[in-house]
Structure formats: C-alpha cells, structure tokens
Image (tube, coloured by chain):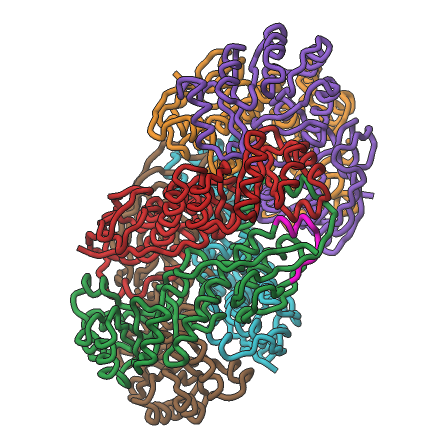
Chain colours: A green, B red, C purple, D orange, E cyan, F brown
Amino acid sequence: MDLEALVRAALDEDIGGGDVTTEACIAADATSTGFLIAKQDLVVAGQAAAAAVFAEMGVQYAVEHDDGAEVSRGTIVARVSGNTRGILTGERLALNFLMRLSGIATNTREHVQAADGAFSVIDTRKTTPLHRTLEKAAVRAGGGKNHRFALYDGVLIKDNHLQACGSVKDAVSRARAAAHHLLAIEVEAETLEQALQAVDAGADCVLLDNMDDERLRESVDALKGRVRIEASGNMTVERLTQLREKGIRPDQVSIGGLIHQARWVDLSLELD
Amino acid sequence: MDLEALVRAALDEDIGGGDVTTEACIAADATSTGFLIAKQDLVVAGQAAAAAVFAEMGVQYAVEHDDGAEVSRGTIVARVSGNTRGILTGERLALNFLMRLSGIATNTREHVQAADGAFSVIDTRKTTPLHRTLEKAAVRAGGGKNHRFALYDGVLIKDNHLQACGSVKDAVSRARAAAHHLLAIEVEAETLEQALQAVDAGADCVLLDNMDDERLRESVDALKGRVRIEASGNMTVERLTQLREKGIRPDQVSIGGLIHQARWVDLSLELD
Amino acid sequence: MDLEALVRAALDEDIGGGDVTTEACIAADATSTGFLIAKQDLVVAGQAAAAAVFAEMGVQYAVEHDDGAEVSRGTIVARVSGNTRGILTGERLALNFLMRLSGIATNTREHVQAADGAFSVIDTRKTTPLHRTLEKAAVRAGGGKNHRFALYDGVLIKDNHLQACGSVKDAVSRARAAAHHLLAIEVEAETLEQALQAVDAGADCVLLDNMDDERLRESVDALKGRVRIEASGNMTVERLTQLREKGIRPDQVSIGGLIHQARWVDLSLELD
Amino acid sequence: MDLEALVRAALDEDIGGGDVTTEACIAADATSTGFLIAKQDLVVAGQAAAAAVFAEMGVQYAVEHDDGAEVSRGTIVARVSGNTRGILTGERLALNFLMRLSGIATNTREHVQAADGAFSVIDTRKTTPLHRTLEKAAVRAGGGKNHRFALYDGVLIKDNHLQACGSVKDAVSRARAAAHHLLAIEVEAETLEQALQAVDAGADCVLLDNMDDERLRESVDALKGRVRIEASGNMTVERLTQLREKGIRPDQVSIGGLIHQARWVDLSLELD
Amino acid sequence: MDLEALVRAALDEDIGGGDVTTEACIAADATSTGFLIAKQDLVVAGQAAAAAVFAEMGVQYAVEHDDGAEVSRGTIVARVSGNTRGILTGERLALNFLMRLSGIATNTREHVQAADGAFSVIDTRKTTPLHRTLEKAAVRAGGGKNHRFALYDGVLIKDNHLQACGSVKDAVSRARAAAHHLLAIEVEAETLEQALQAVDAGADCVLLDNMDDERLRESVDALKGRVRIEASGNMTVERLTQLREKGIRPDQVSIGGLIHQARWVDLSLELD
Amino acid sequence: MDLEALVRAALDEDIGGGDVTTEACIAADATSTGFLIAKQDLVVAGQAAAAAVFAEMGVQYAVEHDDGAEVSRGTIVARVSGNTRGILTGERLALNFLMRLSGIATNTREHVQAADGAFSVIDTRKTTPLHRTLEKAAVRAGGGKNHRFALYDGVLIKDNHLQACGSVKDAVSRARAAAHHLLAIEVEAETLEQALQAVDAGADCVLLDNMDDERLRESVDALKGRVRIEASGNMTVERLTQLREKGIRPDQVSIGGLIHQARWVDLSLELD
C-alpha cells in the first residue's frame, strides 16, 4: 500500500459518508489560511504524509521545516491554504500522522545522541501494521538507520528458527543455498558460543541478544573484525549511554523501542 | 478496510515475495505448537487481530485470555499449533497487534481506575490511521468508552469551526438543520460563557476544553442537568485522580492519550 | 465506494474491453459538442455523477441547471464538448445516472409539495445497493430530508429487534449503554402503548408504523412535545395530502417510496 | 465487479463500522429462524443476491421459490436460520435486492404476456450502474430476453454515431472491418429508407426506432426475411398488445422500461 | 484491469519498498535525457504501455515510431527526459513491455507476409494472463487481426463442448437460444462431415482444426460461400506460405503461435 | 498481487460477464473428469497456478507430476474432476499458465544441462509484468537459480547508474551508506579495469557484461577469490557449453533468455 493509497484509506476511515459538522457549518466555497505549530520541542517527521492528506483535500501545504529538523515549541512547521472545509476535514488525519511520526523521530534522536557515533542505532520489524515505510522514515529523520525492511530483503535466523531447524550450521547453510547472492545472513545468538558457531557457519552478521554488559563486551571482543556485530535487548537511552561510556562497541544496536515506546508529540492546526 | 483486509495488507507489507529465512530453514510440512506469553503485567487486547493473522497463515489460534483480562507476567494468553512456517512467518505481525493494543488497554485501565466511576473515561479521534476500530476496541477492553467513531456519526463543533463560522448560535442552528434527527450536537467551549451560548443554541453536549480545576468546577456546577458535559485537555491519571478527589464531576472525560501516550507492552511467542 | 470509484466501476461494466461501435465508426481525434435535454418536465438530480462520467472520458461538462432545479420539457440541462468518442461512449452511463436520480428528485418533489410544510418528508434505507449517497442527495434535491444514512449513524430499534430482545425497556437501555453519546435512539411502535413504553424508556424518537389516520392522530396527540414523532407505512402523495388536510402532524414522515417507487424520467443527449 | 464483491461493497455501505442497534440489543450468540414473505403477488428474482448477502453474514438461506416463479401474496419465498445478529443486520440489503429485482421480473412478465409470443421482449443498456448483470437476469426471470450486455459484445450503430460518422454505408463498413467475425452489426433507423440503406450496407439487424404503427408495419413488411428486425420506442404493455393484435411482428421489441419503469414490489422478513 | 492499473501493479512488483540502488546513487533532483533504441530489426509494439510506465514515473516519453512501424537495428524508437531516478527505476518495466510486445508484432508480421492477403491471419485466446489487451494490440500492430477477445463476446463450440453436449445440432441450437442476437456462432470441426453438420445446424463460422492440406482443400471447397471458414492447427510461416501457394484459401487462419511462439526482441535504454 | 488475486483477475479477463458457449451448451449440474496431457517432452512448471485456476472454478485438481519433473510426450500431468462447466471455462487459463511456465522450465533445463555444474545458471529481471514470482519459480523448476527478485532486495549498480553517478567508487560508497547491512552490492563492469575499481570500492559481486571468451577468462582469473563473479550477455546454450569446455568459470551466469526466449510448450485438456 503506497502513501497515496494509505492516505485515501485513512481519509475514508475518518470521513466515510461525510464530515457532518464541517458540511453543516462552513460554506462550500469558503477559503482560509492556517498553520501547523509545534506545542513542544520536537524533531519533525511525517511531512510527506501530512502533505498527501491535504493534497487529497485539495488544500495547499507548504512545508516550513523538513523531516529531521529540530524545532522548539511555538515553531510553525507548515502552512495551509485553500478551501476551509478541506482544511478542517483533513486536519485530524494530518495531525495524527505528524504527531505520531514526529514522536518517533524525537524519541530516536535521543537514542542517537546517547550513542554519539559509537555505534549505529537501528530499528526493527516491531512497527505498526501498514505504517512501516513511514515509521522507518521517521527513524531516519531522527538520525537512526534501518534494519531490513521486511521478511523478504534479508535473512535473519532467530531463536525460533534455530529451535525448529536444529543446528546453527544447518540453518545457515540452508539459508545460503536458498537466498540469492545479494542477501546477507544474520544469526541471533544468546551466547558467545552460538555466535561463534554462526561465524563458523558463514554468517555475515550476528545479533547478540539480551546480553548484560560483561557478556556483551566479551562477545564483541571475540567477534570484532570477523563478522558484523549487532546488539539488542532492553536498549534504552540510559543503556546506550552506558555502553558508550564503557567502550563496548558493537557495530550497531537495534531497538524496537525507537518506534514502539515513542509517544505522540503535540502539534496543532490553527486558522489565521 | 475490515479486519481481514487490514491483516492481509499487513501480511503483504511484512512478507511480500516471501519469508526468505523461514522458507530456507524450515521444511514445508513441519508442524509445531507454541504459545504467546505475557512478559509483564498487562490488560489483554487485540486477540481478534492476532487470531486473524494466524488464520491467514493457516495456523490454529486458541485464546486463553480474552480482551479485557488482566494477566500477570508469565501468563500464557494464547496457544498456536500448525505449520511451523506459518507460525514463524505470522509471529511478528500477530505480536505487533497484540503488543500495541494490549498497551492501549493497559494504559486505559489505569485511567479508568483513577476515575473510579466518578465520570466516564472516553477516547478521541486521535488514533493511528487505519487502526481506529482496533484501538477503540482496545479502549473498551481497558474499561473506557468511545466517543463518536468518525466525522460522520456525530456533530462536534470545534474552535476552528466556530472561528470559520462566526457565532456559536449560527453553527448550532446550521448543524441542527443539516444533520439527521438521530445525530446529537456537541460544542467545544473554552469558557463557561461559550458553553452557555451553546446550551442556549440547543447543543446536546458541551466539551469544556483545557480548563483548570476551578474553572471546570464552576462550569460543571453551572451546566449540570442542563446539558451533557465533557471535559478534556491534559487529562492524565494524576489529573483524573485529582478531579475525582475534588468532587469535580463532568459526565465524561475525553483523553487522546489513552491511545497516543500508550506504549507497547511485551509479549513473545515461544515454541514448545 | 466514493463517486469516482463508482463511476469507474460503472464505466468498466459498460465498456470493458472497448466500445466496438464507436471505435470503429468515429475517428480517434474527432471532436463534437452536444447537450443533454429534458424530454419531460422534471426536477434535476445527478449532475455530479454525470459530470464525473464525462470527466473520466475527458469530456467537458457544463451544468446549465443544478440539482434541485425544476425544468420543463425541452430544457437543456447541461452541455458537453470534446472528443466525440468520449461523448458517445460515456453517453449511456451519464444518462442512466441522470434519468434515475432526476426521477427520484421529481417523485420526492411531489411528496414534499403534498406535505406543504406540515411535516418533514424523509427517506429510508430502502435504497439501491451502492447508490445510497446519490439517492439520498436526489431526495434532498427534491426537497426531502434524510433519515440516518446507515446502520452505524443512528439507533433504530425495529419490530424484529424488539421480538429478539424481549422488552422495549431492555432494548432502549442496552442501546443507551452501547451507543456513544452523540447517537440518538428511535423506537418503532405499532401501537400508542408501545410508543409510550419507548418514551418511558428514554427513546429520543418514536416511529409510528402503519397506523390508520385515527390511531395516528391519537398517538401524535398523546406524544407531541414529549418525543420526536415519525410516521411511516403506505405513505403516498394522496395520504400525505390527507394527513395535512386533517391536521395530523407528526414531526416527520418517512417514505421508502420516494426512492423505490420512483420511475426514471426521460432525458437524451444530442450532438449539435 | 462480481456478485460477491458487489454484496460486500453493499454491506460495507450499510454497515460500515457496525450495526449499532443490533449489536446493542441482541446477544452475540443468539440464534433465530425466520422467513421472507411476499406482501403482494409478484415474480421472484434476486434469490442469488439475497443468498449472497446472508452467506456473507454467516446465515443459512433456503430458497423456497426460484427466480422466475410467480407467487401470490403471503407466499414464503425463502427461509433463514442462524445468528440473530446476522439475520437482522443483513435483512435490509437482502430485501433491497429482492424487492428491486422481483419488481423488474414482475414488470417484465406483464410485457411478455402482452407479447404472447408474437415477438421477443428484450431489454436495453438502460440499467442501474453496477447492477446490470442482476437486472438482466431479472428480465430473464420475467420471461424476457437480453440485448447485448454492453458496448463490447455487439455493434449497435445509433443516431449519434451516424451523425458523427456521415453515412450508414461508411459506418457499417468500418464496423465490419474493425469488429471480429463473431460480432454482428445492428443499425438504428428512424425511417424505412435508412433501414434499407443499412441492409444494403450489410447490417445483420435493424432497430426501427420510434415509428408509429403504420410506419412500423410498412417497414416490417419491407424488411422481413432480409434482416433481423427490432422495434423500440414508447413500448408499453398496451402498445405491445396493440402490435400483437394488429399483426405487426418485428422479430424483437426492446424496452428500457422493463427495468427503468419497474417499481419495487413488497416483501418482508419476519422472525418465527 | 486497465492499462494504468496494470502498469501500477507491475511497478509495484518491481519497485515495492524502493529502488535501493537508484535512491542511493542518484540525487533526488538530478535530470537526464535518453532514448530507447532497437538492437535488432523489429516491428514496434507496446508504445502505450511504455509511455504509461514513464508517465507513472513522472518522466516525459516522446514516441519516435508508432506501433506497427518496421524499424531497423539502431533506430531510436522513443526519447525520455526528466528526473533521472524516474528514468532508471522505470527503465526495466518499460523495456519488458516493449521487448515482449514488439516480439509479438515482429513475429506476426512474418506470418502476415507469408499469407500475403490470401487469408486473414488471426490470433487466439492463448495469451499471457492479464496481458491479452496488449498482446492482441501487438498482433494488430504486426498486421494480424483478432479473434473474439474472450469467452463473453462470441460463441465458439469446441471439441470438449461437443463431447459434453452430445450432438453438433443440439449445441448450436442451445447456443442460438441463449446468446443474444449480436453474437455469431462458430463450431470447431475435425472433419468435413462435422463441418457440414455445423452448417446445417446454423453455425455462422466453422473452425477446421488440424487438417492436412488435402483435407483442408476438400473442406474449403465444400464449404466456401455457405459459411465463414477458419483453419487452425500447426500453422507456421512455412505452412501459411504453402497454403497460399497451393491456393487453399479459408477466410482466416488462427494461430496461437503469433503470441506464444514469439520471442522478445532486443531494445535498450541509453542516457545521453 | 498474490497468486489468488492474479488468478482471479485473469479469470475475469477471460470470463467477464460469462462463458456464453459453455453456459449455453452444458447443463449447470453436469460433471466430468478429464486430464491434462503433455503433447511434447517437457519439464513441468506452473502446477500451483493451474491448481489455483481450477480451485476458483470449484474443480478438483490432482497433480500427477510436480514442478520440475521431466515428462515425455503423452504423459498425464494432472487430472481434473467436477462440474463440467467449471472444467471447460477454466481450461484455457490453466493451460495458458502451464504451457508458458513449462516452456520456461524446459528452456532453463537445457541451459542448466549445458552448464553441467560449472557455474550457476540464474535469471534476471527481464520477466513478464505481474508474472515474476511464477516465472522465477519456473526457472527453479528447470534447475536454475534466481537473481534478486526486484529493485528492493539487492543493490545492482548498472552502466546507467554509473553514467549518472560519476565514479564507481562514489556509487558503491553511496550504496553502502544507504542500504541496510543485509543487502550486498553488485556492480556491472564492461572491462576488467571497471571490475577492479568495483572490488576496490568494496563491491560484493561484479557483473561482467558482454565480454568475449578471452576477456571473460582474463577477468575471471584476475578476480577469482576476491569477489563473487557473474557473467552475462548473449548467453545461449551453445555459449554455456563453450565456456564450460574452455574452463572459463565465473560463479554464476545470468541469462534473461531463460524466460524471454522460452516458447510455450504444448499441453491439452481432454475429457474422459
């Protein structure tokens, strides 16, 4: 579902047979101008979605601050102009996109600042159904990077695959035989021993899951230079800071919470 | 978009051309059983969505705890059995639904407990695009009630409508003339004066927005019995407790944060 | 299904792989002008649908008489200009919309004139599947008003609900608990006794169904001022006239026949 | 759009987010039986559509009288059994199909009886958008026959084509060159002279449009045996009777009014 | 599925979540010009599809040689200009259409030249699913003609129908009764005897299937002037030449291989 | 578009409003059995698509030889049983899938046999729009392997990217920065020099395009062990044999012609 289709379906969800209030109260040919304003400090994301909402409503949408911009409370992030009914009927959906996605970007930015370049901060597949493209873009707006998009563009052998498959070696060799040559193979490991098996089996990347700092340091030391190293599990802003300060440096840390622990930030639309 | 269509589109988002890992590692006819387990205390929501995901994958899904149940960490909320590939490929999407929606139910439950029956706790239209039906059901699972579903099943005249329309009186009379006789009319008011104008104009409900405790008490006292009263704006668990304790009792309090400040709770799928 | 989607699907129904006749007989770059003309006195409705058909065909469509206009035989209601193939291929569908919907508007106008302001004349859910939005707009074009649009934007407890539910009281109280606060509740009653039970149970509106004049008068007298009163059942132009002349005045009369007893009126497209 | 898709879209139109009344008043697991009963004499049509509606609702639907059956007032035409909510929520749409389509079949039957085998009674492309398959089936249920389904399965050169194309001869020869060999060619003629030109040009069928009885008799006499003859224009039950009695016998008479002058007949659903 | 929908679905197939390479390597606002060039002698077909692909990508597409043109190796058949990303991302799909369809046109042209006007060369329903409209247009670009488009716009009684139905006579008379008057009837015959039965039963066309030259000559001689004659079965360029040289002249020869034995021809896109 | 959707759309293309012939000639409740038989030696592919067609028609389909099986002329590859109308109406589409896809598998098998294990034989993105999943499965059925599926699951920097981007080094480093860590990077090179630049820039794979045997040998010798090597350009069965015999061994050879030079093989459906 591309952005245009998503926006149309979402407008249909909210408008259905019609916006009774607006159609009753506002003349069909009335026009207005207005603006979207940050009600708190935030990192902008979702401008393309908000623009698509107003484009569907036939309303002009002029971006003042692009995705990725850090803006303070009271900043106007975009201006609208056009048919008043269109503005009022599209308002809620546009804000729902902007508030959600800017919330993710803002949350990601905090994690990236905690990492301070010691390792990449990347997302996961724990995303809101049908919103993955937008949410992964919001992570990038916040300064994070993306893991694979979905089940089809990367091999990630997880604990349940290993349990169902038998051995790390079998799993990796089957994956190598089945996947085309441009897909790399990553293996989730809960212990250094598993990680080393994965390396021996030919994995391109190991995912060290749920290790405490000491086990993580030991594993990174043992694996560095032999394979790409990803760490995950309970990774908060505090933990990232701690890893950085302790000098524990996997290549990348993956954090579902960039998206799923983010809260909406506050923006509103006001008419001039 | 009904639940089945939503689930199919979401599976398409995650699977696309195929789950490379699972297809490579797991035999096509392998079967497994497993369970979904709460990794923290939570209120369950989203069982229908999770069931729909596994139904699409051809996997049996047996609910152990229905939406609305409070379960403690370690509780099995559902069991799966069937084709191993189906279980592993559907796992993430099913969990994405359950973790999000249970997060909303859990968050709502806290608010409802704070209200303790002094007023209804209801949601808003600040919902995730295309997920409104599910999110509003999660609010009910948490013990909350729903506001109108969308722009078509209720009249809510907000500040921007009033600004564009002119007077409260005009807005209400236009809405009464245009809306069919089974739709009631609510008017957002920032002052008691506005609220009284709305009542005089024939509104069925007033929405007292962003008032502090004293102004809210004054308004509720003045309006009680003459019109349905809704309060909103910065309504947290703490504020609800405070209103209840102070005896300030609108008929209902609407809170966008039931949904948009909820964080995902943690559940996982494990194979037997 | 919005108007654009409806029109596309309808064009696909009629054109499918191609308009063999027009493609064979008319040069691809030929252009023409023409007009749509009333072949009988009628009330116009369906201009938006006709315009949407020709827009899809890339043909200019200029409305001469808007929905709601009463025009006499021989009046040009719209003009077309553009690609000849587009005009001829779209002709039938545009006329099918206009003839149907103007038929409904014309029929509604007769009923509204019979009521002469004594009560509102409103439609029902007896509409052609997928055409409800258009048909309800045609009723408005004829001077009628709309009942609820569908099952989701109003509560109407009918005889079968009462039979399955048990008592009027239970039905109304369950509806009040389940429906959000902006939806009013209407109850169908075949006797004054039932109507009074509904009022006692808190119904906002009663639907007096299939009563003869005397029973209707008695019920209206007993209920007036206590609840909104709707009458229905065998309501023809003659019956409306009779009710008006007898001074029997419910608030509104609902008539499925506005739509389902309407016949198409005659219009045709002619090239200049 | 096939029947299943049509029914789903129509249910979505009527139910949308939910049937508030039924969900409130009726327990989710309640079951009922009931029947659909003719409230007037009629010819049945639309059983497949009604069945499809209830199938979508998970309700058993047992046909008592197939499409084409003549039934008298009080006859049960089908029985339903299953989930009470499903029955009540699907009731209106099923009846909307049955009442419309049986109306068309009943109306067609009258015309066919008037023709009494003297000529075929056939329909036109004046059908309700998206309902053509159902309406043409209703015409067959009434004993009529169908003209071409749409613009792609037959060549019909009408007055506007002739005007835009120039001569009958050119139009027919272009059509013969462009259409594949299994499509026959029909030409609309307002005079015998035009009809003869069409025959000379190689038309397979001529459509004598809007002729009075004498001109029609003259034309049929002149053309009989040389080409298939269709008559149309103001063809009512009375006119058909008159043509038959006068011995004026084209091969077929096409009548838009079979469909567009039909009124819904009355049926209702009652619970046992 | 119309051309626009086909192209959108095909772009979705190829692009999905994004063209990783182009998005990484090419600046979002870079622009380029380029051309599509024939790498071998060929007959052009598919320009509308290629144009639709680039239109979706927002790229200008200027046709240099229309469908049906014979061009030699090194000829530029179209030019593109616009956003570089759009050009590169759309390149493959546009070429996939052009190479396939020009292959069909080129192959058809050879067959048509072999027939040299002795009989029409027509296609069959052996087409690539969802590509029939395009493939049949490519046959016309190559100089061939089309058989019926699909199962709905012509009656073709084949061997399996005859086997299941019983007799030729029954099959034809049932078809005549059921099909509307603008659909002609063709019968497949493996022997002259069957063909004569079909003629006696009223068939408009006979399809002489898999006859050798002598049986074909005998049948054509016996049937000529009484019915339209189509021949099929193992019809290659060589066989067509042979039939023409021997003076065996059915009205038309149908050849699945126009489409299904065609190979893609070579074209490429080059940037200036 | 998944297989079920593809099959439904393809049936709609062929059946549309109905199979006039079959509906006329065959009783609605007639049943038959039959079989699909190879009319030439071939490698089977497309059984899932054929099965999906008959499943839509409500016909049982029993596979006798799975995808990948080599069968000789006269072999029954599947059996059908069920409603006769369903069999006859679905016949053409099922065969269109089987004949196309078995043609691709058969063609691929010849190439794979020529390679005889000296290198992998892989496909390209030169596939029929909307049929890529099926065509790539047919390549695997023939013994070939797949290249990336689409633009989103692998980075392939081609000549046009290099021309638009500037240098190999820049292109690779941009791709590495933008692509997630599980996507490998391949660069097209027309000379050994370019290939070495790609290796230096960090490419995971080089595509040696259109080199003659000597240049290809030289390049493979220089690159072996440093990077994955793919060769392409004018790769026929003869060329593969020649490369193998000369001992020129890239890791893989990609061949668009596996798919686009394949011709349909012959199968037919016969009733018992």
Q: Nearer the viewer, residue D38 or B241?
A: B241
Q: Residue D265's image quarter?
A: top right
> Is residue C151 shown to the viewer in this render?
yes
Quarter containing the C terminus of chain B: bottom left
Give coordinates of residue C125: x percent, y percent.
56, 28
Give coordinates of residue E205: x percent, y percent.
53, 43
Give coordinates of residue A259: x percent, y percent.
41, 63
User: Does residue C247 appear left or right of residue C73 in this picture?
Assistant: left
Would you place residue B75 above or below residue F240 in this image?
A: above
Give coordinates of residue A139: x percent, y percent.
45, 68
Please check the rendered image and state whether residue E44 is part of the magenta-colored stretch, yes or no: no
**Region in magenta:** A79-89
Please check the rendered image and state whether residue A85 is part of the magenta-colored stretch, yes or no: yes
User: Does residue D120 appear left or right of residue E193 in this picture?
Assistant: right
User: Does residue A173 appear left or right of residue D73 in this picture?
Assistant: left
Residue at 75% in and 32% down = C68
Q: Residue E214's image quarter?
A: bottom left
Q: Nearer the viewer, residue C164 or E86?
A: C164
> Is residue D226 shown to the viewer in this render?
no
User: Does residue E7 appear left or right of residue F62 in this picture?
Assistant: right
Q: Residue furthest top?
A: C214
Residue at 26% in and 84% down = A226
Residue at 61% in and 7% down = C218
Count of picture labels: 0
Q: Nearer the viewer, residue F17 or C37?
A: C37
Q: Nearer the viewer, residue E159 or E90?
A: E90
Would you place residue E92 above or below residue C185 in this image?
A: below
